[in-house]
Image (tube, grey):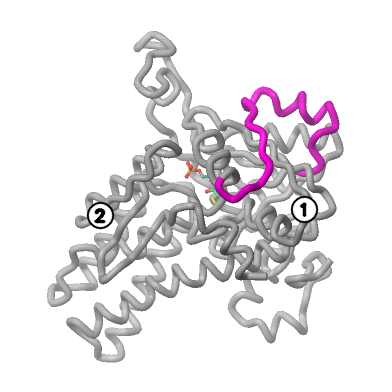
Amino acid sequence: MTSSISTQTAAVPMAVVWRDGQLWLLDQTRLPFDEHVFHCDTLESVFEAIRALKVRGAPAIGIAAAYGMLVDLDPVSDLPALLTQRADYLMSARPTAVNLAWAVQRMLAIMAVAMHDGLCGDELFARLEKEAIAIHEEDKAACRAIGEAGAPLVAEFPKVLTHCNAGSLAVSELGTALAPIYVAAAQGVSVHVYVDETRPLLQGARLTAFELGRAGVNRTLITDSMAAHVMAQGDVQMVLVGTDRVAANGDVANKIGTLGLAILCQYYGIPFYVACPVSTIDLATPTGKGIEIEQRHADEVRQFAGIDLAEADTPVFNPAFDVTPAALVTGIITDHGIARAPFGPALAAIVTASITPRAFESTTAQSVEIRGGA
Ligand code: MRU
């Protein structure tokens, strides 16, 4: 199954590439018309790429930041202080996606272990590089597992609507929300995806429509305001989106506009699913109220592609994300099973399973379907 999936997404360029100790990023602000890959050779260039959404999507930001900790790093300097500074700096680029903090904190943790083991200089750098590569590789495996866990749902509900971009471009490869779609399509399911354009930055129109097209998946682009209409017509059987952070109670932060879709789903009786790797579950944040929502520049709303849409002094509100309450979520598809309400114990069991698989097998909560389960 894996080979047919990778064939299907092979035409989509990689968001993050680490080659010979150098970081290369696909500039997603130029898609779909220009597949420009650029070399990130300073810490500042990594920060700026994350802030400007050249690399975006929660897992891809985390992977880029893990490598970013190593870019242009002098391994003989005072590494603990330097890497802690770097971690703080990179985390300040975007506050909502928990994968960013998760990845850089994992790098700091491995540094502490390596130093305790007496590593220094090039050996220490090699250990850190190995960890960043592990973060990248684990994300690939997580995406495949999400795809396999969610594919039966897509087979049952093949008319899907998605928002923003939670595909290959947002991760290592394959995607989170798009992974079950790619896997189901590879299994012969005839899938159709309505793609919300996703104002203001059009990740749906520029990225999701692009990558589904490259993968040969049927898709129809709509403006965000058309979602209710296509649902009313009976053309949507499931909404499937990614997330930047899942709170311990199952509240879900995702691209602005997601909350409206979840409310519509409740009205029309449409299942509302979220897909993410375990690294996006933040048990340290009890509810969505504790998730910091990134506010972005007013010109992203006042302008489009440099063209003024409103007078330059028009006051603007531009939150990048909203929070969907757990009560509106049908299920959260992860690489360790699908969580369903009550989400508190289900998410805790999934996180435990990701750390100690054996313990999980004997204490499975009823609200969690084991990976590959129905
Ligand atoms: O602002 P973006 O483009 O980084 O927002 C991305 C999203 O909202 C995605 O749905 C989320 O990060 C999940 S990506 C697998």
Residue 224 colored magenta? yes
Q: Amino acid at mark 1?
A: Val
How many numbered marks appear? 2
Asked if residue 291 shows in the view, the reply is yes
Q: Does label 2 or label 1 sit earlier along the sequence?
A: 2
What span is colored magenta in the figure? 214-238
Can you identify the residue that label 1 sits on?
154
Judge from the rendering whether residue 243 lies leftward or rightward of residue 82; answer left or right: right
Question: Alpha-carbon neighbours of circle 1 within 10 Å: few (<14), some, or many (≥20)?
Answer: many
Which quadrant holds residue 298?
top left
Q: Residues within 10 Å of mark 2 (few under 14, many from 20)?
A: many
Residue in the picture at 55% in, 44% down: 165
Q: Position of residue 60 (x, y in %)?
A: 45, 56
* Residue at x-position 84% and y-position 27%: 233
Which residue of the protein is positioned furthest toward the bottom in this rendering? 117
Name the residue carrying label 2.
Answer: 40
Which residue is at the front of the view, 176 or 282? 176
Q: Mark 2 belongs to which amino acid?
A: Cys
Q: Residue at x 55, y 47 (%)?
A: 214
Image height of 171 relative to 73, above or below: above
Name the residue furthest top: 311
Determine the image quadrant of residue 356. Answer: bottom right
